[in-house]
Image (spheres, grey):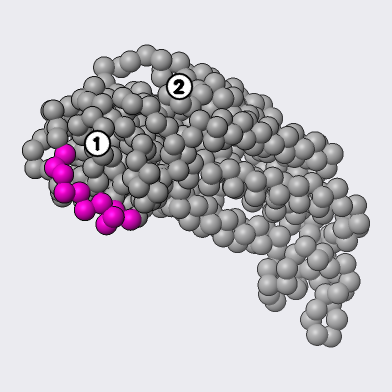
Amino acid sequence: MNQSLTETSHAGQEVDQYGEHHAEHDDRLQHHFATFEQQFDAAKIGMWLFLATEILMFGGLFVGFALQQSAHPDAFVAAHHHLDKRLGALNTVVLLLSSFTMVMAVWSAQNARRKAMTTYLLVTLACAATFMVVKFFEYSHKFHDGTLPGSFYRVQHVGEVPNQFIFFSFYFMMTGLHGIHVLVGMGLITWLIIKGRNGRFDGTYYTPVDLVGLYWHLVDLIWIYLFPLLYLIS
Amino acid sequence: MATETLNTAAAHTHAATTDHGHIHGGPKIYGAVLAALLFLTVLTVGASYIHFGSGMANVIIALVIASLKASLVALFFMHLRWDRPISAITFCASLFFLGLFLIGCYTDYISRAPSEPANIKSAVAPGGLVGPQQNQVTPQPNHGAPGGSTPSGASGPVVQGASPEGNSGGPMTGKEHPSPQVPTHQ
């Protein structure tokens, strides 16, 4: 801390008798960090730890899916024909596009291009909304058909491959948890847009943009695995 | 920009060092990565229409392509390529433990008698439903899966969800099905 004080003193900042530098203090730099860079790195480590817990949370579902698929291969193959590959592919493309616009928003924030950042964030938000609308149509189709998880499964065709409800249990839990993450991401992006319009971010401080970007890319990453596993297995 | 004026000279010197540490990539690289990701998406959808010998081969090909896409996203969009090693270490550690999780569960699963959800349906004589599958010692002729209780559709007429008590019981109330009948397998 002493080091940073002398550093800031050299830079012409006023330091009062308590060693606090009131004048021209940037409230975006929290007091327990010496520099913006240190604050950014610490926040980033925390974010990656959170992402690790996210991976493990989804990992439980992926492991369960793998085990049940190997136990009921016929049921899983039969059940996945109820899903529309084209809608899944559309949502994949939409999410990949949103990941691109998100990373461009981060890049714009890093380079202090405020308007570009807002535009990219708005496009990302629009992509996320598109994803949820497609998801809504897929879900309502399944509610109509009765291909629901567990004991809510209501398809009664004689001669159907049994135990398809297991697939739909995983389908709804995995895409549902993923969809909740997309909704949370939409909330976070909206928050970034509001903060960005208020001039909160510039080349010095863009930590929230970077971290929400990481979160958004993880949501994309999980969908990259969900799409082939749920829609494309054969 | 109210806070812009608050930036001290010191903050600007930090910003200068920060720039060297964190700014990289750029529209060209990100655009190229996006193009690669879209190409791989087309590839994986196309591959799903081709039958590569066995279902397992298709799954492996799909997962390899997905992992390529995930690597591109992690390396470029998530900045791991340029980031401090601690981020990649954290990321890889989570994948490592996920691998342990999968291996542990799978070896446990294949090395013990089959256990199934309580409301699993079995193939039975027409018009009948039985409760939970009892552990079967005899291997199934239809498939070699360790679960051993999923006959293929051709093995007999199956009525799924036709019995009210069969569905309303829910997955966790298997004790409602004492299952005196022995499931018949063909």
> Please, which residue is most extreme toward the bottom here?
A17
Please tell me in which quadrant of the rendered image residue A106 appears.
top right
**Residue, disc 1:** B128
In the image: residue A5, left or right of residue A85: right
Residue located at (69% from left, 45% from top): A186
Q: What's drawn in magenta, residue-wise?
A: B173-183
Callout 1: residue from which chain? B
At x 53%, y 47%, the residue is A177
Horizontal side of A208 relative to A232 (left or right) equals right
Mark yes or no: residue A132 visible.
yes
> Residue A3 or B135: which is nearer the viewer?
B135
Foreground mark, 2 or 1? 1
Residue A111: x %, y % from top left: 76, 42
Q: Chain of mark 2?
A: B
Label 2–label 1 contact, CB within 8 A: no
Mark 1: few/some/many CA within 10 Å (<14, 14-19, 20+): some
Residue A136: quarter of image? top right
The crowd level at tag 2 (other Cα within 10 Å; few <14, some 14-19, many 20+) is many
Label 2 SS = helix
Q: Earlier in the sequence, mark 2 or mark 1?
A: 2
- Name the residue type under label 1: Gly
Q: Is residue A228 magenta?
A: no
Indicate whether A161 appears above or below B84: above
Q: Is residue B176 magenta?
A: yes
Indicate the secondary structure of the residue bearing disc 1. Answer: loop
Q: Quadrant of the C terminus of chain B?
A: top left
Mark drawn on residue B175: none
Give the alpha-carbon distance from disc 2 to disc 1, as whole Å: 42 Å
Decide: is A168 above or below A12.
Answer: above
- Along the viewing direction, whichever of B170 and A169 lies nearer the viewer: B170
Q: Which residue is denoted by mark 2 in the rendering?
A: B44
Residue A223 position in % (x across, y down): 52, 36
